[in-house]
Image: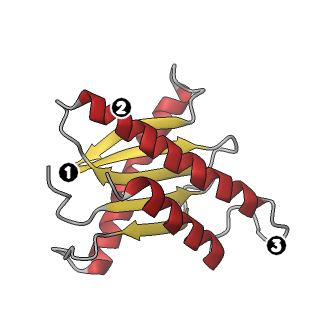
């Protein structure tokens, strides 16, 4: 299956008041967007925030003790996976939808995404321990952005 027409990956951290704290886009080098870059960002934000209802529903349902939710929502050729921290901060990842007939690949993909979320969660915890970081404020640290970029390259670019 081809990559989504709008881009490849979009990762966002959502705070307690459903505001984005951190956004990261990962596009293939040769990939051209079929829409302007600013519109692409707004579309990603719209899809991510629309998926928050599904995340909230799963938090109160029978799977409410889970931290990782694979394919919690879909939009066109994107799938949304989520990770909820113990402090209720939400990590959302928009990624290409895979062919449903490849169940072994889907299990491997779930493990890859879960590992990515745990790697970012580790960096996020270290950021939260910084006495200069204010809770629920935008994450502007270049070091954090670089660590997320390294995690994307390590875990997700083969999706």
Label pair 1/2, CB-CB below 8 angstroms: no
State the CA–CA distance, disc 1 to disc 2: 19 Å
Q: How many marks?
A: 3
Query: Element under label 2?
Result: helix
**In the image, is residue 59 above or below residue 135?**
above
Q: Is residue 141 visible?
A: no
Residue that mark 2 sits on: 107
**For marks 1 and 3 on the same chain, the one whose residue lies earlier in the sequence:** 1
- The residue at 19%/33% (across/down) is 100
Element marked by disc 1: loop
Q: CA distance from mark 1 to mark 3?
A: 39 Å
Q: Nearer the viewer, residue 116 or 57?
A: 116
**Front tag of 1 and 2:** 2
Residue hosting label 1: 77
**Does 148 sit left or right of 33 as displayed?**
right
Residue 39: percent from the left, percent from the top? 28, 75
The residue singled out by tag 3 in the image is: 132
Report the coloring of the rendering: secondary structure
Residue 42 falls in image quadrant: bottom left
């Amino acid at each position: 299956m081809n990559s989504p027409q709008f881009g490849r990956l979009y990762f966002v951290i959502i705070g307690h008041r459903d505001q984005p704290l951190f956004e990261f886009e990962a596009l293939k080098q040769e990939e051209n967007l079929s829409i302007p870059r600013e519109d692409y960002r707004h579309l990603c934000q719209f899809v991510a925030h629309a998926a928050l209802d599904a995340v909230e529903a799963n938090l109160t349902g029978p799977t409410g003790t889970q931290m990782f939710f694979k394919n919690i929502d879909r939009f066109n050729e994107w799938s949304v996976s989520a990770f909820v921290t113990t402090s209720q901060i939400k990590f959302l990842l928009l990624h290409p939808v895979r062919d449903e007939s490849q169940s072994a690949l889907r299990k491997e993909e779930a493990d890859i995404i879960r590992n990515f979320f745990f790697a970012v969660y580790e960096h996020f915890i270290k950021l939260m321990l910084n006495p200069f970081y204010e809770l629920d404020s935008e994450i502007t640290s270049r070091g954090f952005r670089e660590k997320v970029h390294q995690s994307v390259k390590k875990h997700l670019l083969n999706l």
